Image (cartoon, helix red, strand yellow):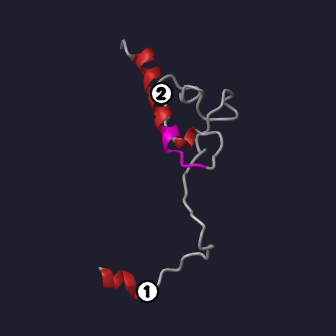
Amino acid sequence: IRDWVLAEPLDWPETDEDEVGGKHHMGTTRMADDPKRGVVDRDCRVHGLANLYIGGSSVFPSGGHANPTYTVVQLALRLGDHLGRTLGGR
């Protein structure tokens, strides 16, 4: 497979030598108190649905400048606590 991979040069976009790039998908199911402005509320519950939650960087209302991993982990822990309190007795 090495020969196959190296057979044709990859056509990467030009960047500065010191530039570091990466992509993190965020904001596709935004968090907002108003259902007209977002998909989920502050507890990550989908507006208008009693038992559907979304956890992940898609609920971020905007992107940041840093890797979102720790924020996603904290959001997941917070959502887990919320679900434990609200659904734990069921």
Mark 1: few, some, or many residues within 10 Å (few <14, many ≥20)? few
Tell me the quadrant of the picture where the C terminus can be found: top left
Q: Residue at x 54, y 49 (%)?
A: 67
Q: Residue 58 lies in what quarter of the image?
A: top right
Q: Nearer the viewer, residue 35 or 30?
A: 30
Residue pointed to by mark 1: 8
- Residue extending farthest to the bottom is 7
Residue pointed to by mark 2: 79
Residue 76: numbered disc: none
What is the three-letter code of the residue carrying label 1?
A: Glu
Left or right of 30 in this view: 90: left
* Magenta residues, start to end: 66-72
The spot of residue 89 in percent (x, y) is: 36, 12
Q: Secondary structure at mark 2?
A: helix
Q: Is residue 79 magenta?
A: no
Q: Nearer the viewer, residue 2 or 27?
A: 2
The spot of residue 30 in percent (x, y) is: 62, 38
Mark 2: few, some, or many residues within 10 Å (few <14, many ≥20)? some
Q: Secondary structure at mark 1?
A: loop
The spot of residue 27 in percent (x, y) is: 61, 44
